[in-house]
Image (tube, helix red, strand yellow):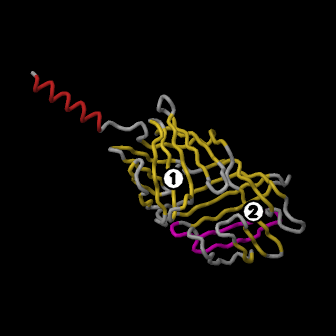
Amino acid sequence: MRAVILATALALASASAHAASSFDGRWVDDLKTQMGEAGSDVYLVASGIYKCDSCSPPRAYPADGKARAVAGDTYAKSESVTVVGPRTMVTRIVGPDMTRETTMTVAPDDKSATYVSLDQWPGKPTRLRTEYLAKRTAPAPAGANAVSGSWLGVAYVAVPEEYRSVELKEADGRFSRSNFRHGHYTAEIGGPAAPLTGDGQDIYQATIRAPDARTRVESILRDGKLVIVRTYSLSADGKSMETAVRDPMDGHIFRTTSYRK
């Protein structure tokens, strides 16, 4: 009998050690739960020249629709801008793994702008569409196209589920994250940075911390420099999760709530 009890206890301990984490699963952001504002865009389109001071790195070239290499931009093999009207421009970026065409249109009241991006990925028959709303925070200079000035992101209107879903898994002191756009990693909780792969660049690293049982803090780095911080916070019942994304450059925090699917 003692042997049976011991065997049962060991089996229960083993099952507990390998029990699924409350973070495990596929989580999908609910766009209706967005809080906060994204970063700012600063453009000047005048006299046939496109200039972007908020881009990384900043850039300036003729807005003639011709593709040009942008030195120092790992996300773009080439980029072009076409002015298609007094309130509209189209930017086309050819990246390492996908091509994005974004149409920015300024509203008639000049106070807001809509960005519609169409992304073409290898192996996908149709382009993925994202719609994004921004508000004007600085006017366009006299004589410049209406897209000029400063624009602060307000909300995503439409985002493909592939972009707003994430797979999380935690086991044996290690945390894994996988996302269609942002790649995947497996890192030791509280341990050193682990390589982030599958995002088309493979130049980033990730660390993960566990401040408490329902919180995980993910730091994305490049060459040791902090690029973005994501904090995953489970609700008390474990049925929802808030993700807070902080940009260390400007301090902006963008929050969404996701649900397990």
Residue 208 shown left or right of residue 43 in the figure: left
Marks 1/2: CA distance? 27 Å
Tell me where residue 5 appears, x and y as whole percent: 15, 24
- In the image, is residue 185 above or below residue 253? below
Residue identified by numbered label 1: 219
Going by the numbered disc 2, the residue's amino acid type is Val
Q: Quadrant of residue 93?
A: bottom right
- In the image, is residue 60 above or below residue 185? below
Which residue is drawn at the image coordinates 76% and 70% (left, top)?
A: 83
Tell me where residue 211 appears, x and y as whole percent: 48, 40
What number is the disc on residue 42? 2
- Dominant secondary structure of the residues highlighted in magenta in the image: strand
Asked whether 222 falls inside the magenta stretch, the response is no
Which of these two is toward me, 186 or 226?
226
Contact flag, marks 1 and 2 (Cβ < 8 Å): no
Mark 1 falls on what kind of element? Answer: strand
Which residue is drawn at the image coordinates 58% and 44% (left, top)?
A: 244
Q: Which residues are magenta?
A: 76-97
Residue 246 shown left or right of residue 215 in the figure: right
Which residue of the protein is positioned furthest toward the right in this rendering?
Answer: 142
Q: Which quadrant would the N terminus be assigned to in this image? A: top left
Going by the numbered disc 1, the residue's amino acid type is Ser
Tell me where residue 28 appears, x and y as whole percent: 52, 43
* Number of other residues with Cα within 10 Å of mark 2, as a class: few under 14, some 14 to 19, many 20 or more: many
Which residue of the protein is positioned furthest toward the top in this rendering?
Answer: 1
